[in-house]
Image (cartoon, rainbow, N blue to C red):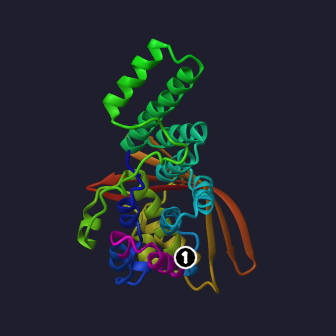
């Protein structure tokens, strides 16, 4: 089986405007050449300036696993499942590492969570099927150790070997192995299709950063021309209302926690806990953004708090 870490998806999820353009293709080339140590140095530098970026943290977990620092990689992915529970990839990679340690029950739970988060995530479905096959192989082997004459176990184990062409599982075998058919160029990375959920996470992260950087034009650009909130404000009225709350602040610190995404007809509902701090103002608010996808563009059509 192959190691389906989906590095390509994570690269696409980068907010390229926040990093040196040269960093991305350089990082891609280092990983392609399996120069994980040098790639880790670049990722560490990027994390130093953006330590809450889920894409960077994800790549960090992948590189840690490739460098053999499995416990550290597991800690990274566990943390990501807590801070970004709607992303399926961290659960999938956690399952890979659990399986590598022989913790098949934990791997199964992680894959089931990945699928629950993103039912159309084919990689997790494939990995779960592979995991069941390997668990079955171990069970048949254990049955044969107890009763070597058990023809039923012999037949089924022989069938598994024939169908999947592998030997009885070793506790150290990883669940998968293919760093996901990595793209070989920056252009290929940009062309890879990612799920709407992943795009929403990237959009929300960029929306938050535009607010923190007090870049009002970029911030308001995430709102739809069809915007109308529950108080009846249209986009122009919303601009007038929000502008003094975004610009000319001494500084803004913003954290979004417990992000949950659900779909209702053609709208995506993104709910989260917003922790805002600026000057003497320190507030925690429950907020929901209603987002529409039109012509492959995500735009906020309502904001509820």
| Residue at the extreme front of the image, as rendered | 148
192 displayed left or right of 273? left
Callout 1 crowding tier (Cα within 10 Å): few <14, some 14–19, many ≥20? some
Instruction: Give x and y (percent) for residue 273.
Output: 64, 57
Which residue is painted at 47% across and 66% down in the image?
Answer: 59
Q: Which of these two is toward me, 51 or 220?
A: 51
Q: At 51% across and 31% down in the image, what residue appears?
A: 135
Query: Is 249 in the magenta?
Result: no
Judge whether residue 228 can be spotted in this image: no
Span of residues in magenta: 30-47
Magenta stretch, overall SS: helix
Q: Quadrant of the C terminus?
A: bottom right
In-front residue for pair 138/26: 138
Question: Left or right: 96 with respect to 106?
Answer: left
Q: Which residue is mark 1?
A: 47
- Numbered marks: total: 1
């Amino acid at each position: 089986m192959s190691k389906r870490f989906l590095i390509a998806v994570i690269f696409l999820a980068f907010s390229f405007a926040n990093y040196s353009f040269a960093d991305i293709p350089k990082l891609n080339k280092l990983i392609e050449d399996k120069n994980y140590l040098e790639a880790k140095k670049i990722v560490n530098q990027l994390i130093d300036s953006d330590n809450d970026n889920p894409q960077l943290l994800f790549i960090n977990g992948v590189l840690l696993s490739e460098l053999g620092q499995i416990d550290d990689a597991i800690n990274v992915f566990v943390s990501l499942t807590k801070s970004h529970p709607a992303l399926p990839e961290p659960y999938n990679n956690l399952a890979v590492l659990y399986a590598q340690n022989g913790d098949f029950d934990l791997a199964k739970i992680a894959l089931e969570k990945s699928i629950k988060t993103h039912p159309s995530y084919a990689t997790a479905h494939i990995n779960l099927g592979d995991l069941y096959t390997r668990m079955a192989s171990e069970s048949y082997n254990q049955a044969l150790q107890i009763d070597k004459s058990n023809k039923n176990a012999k037949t089924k184990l022989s069938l598994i070997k024939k169908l999947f062409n592998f030997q009885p599982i070793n506790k150290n075998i990883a669940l998968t192995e293919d760093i996901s058919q990595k793209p070989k160029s920056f252009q290929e990375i940009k062309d890879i299709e990612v799920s709407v959920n992943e795009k929403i996470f990237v959009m929300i992260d960029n929306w938050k950063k535009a607010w923190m950087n007090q870049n009002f034009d970029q911030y308001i650009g995430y709102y739809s021309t069809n915007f109308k909130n529950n108080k009846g404000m249209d986009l122009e009225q919303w601009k007038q209302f929000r502008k003094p709350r975004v610009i000319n602040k001494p500084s803004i610190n913003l954290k979004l926690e417990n992000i949950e995404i659900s779909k209702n007809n053609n709208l995506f509902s993104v709910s989260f806990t917003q922790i805002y701090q600026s000057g003497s103002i320190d507030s925690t608010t429950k907020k929901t953004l209603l987002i529409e996808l039109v012509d492959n563009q995500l735009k906020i059509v309502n904001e509820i708090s």
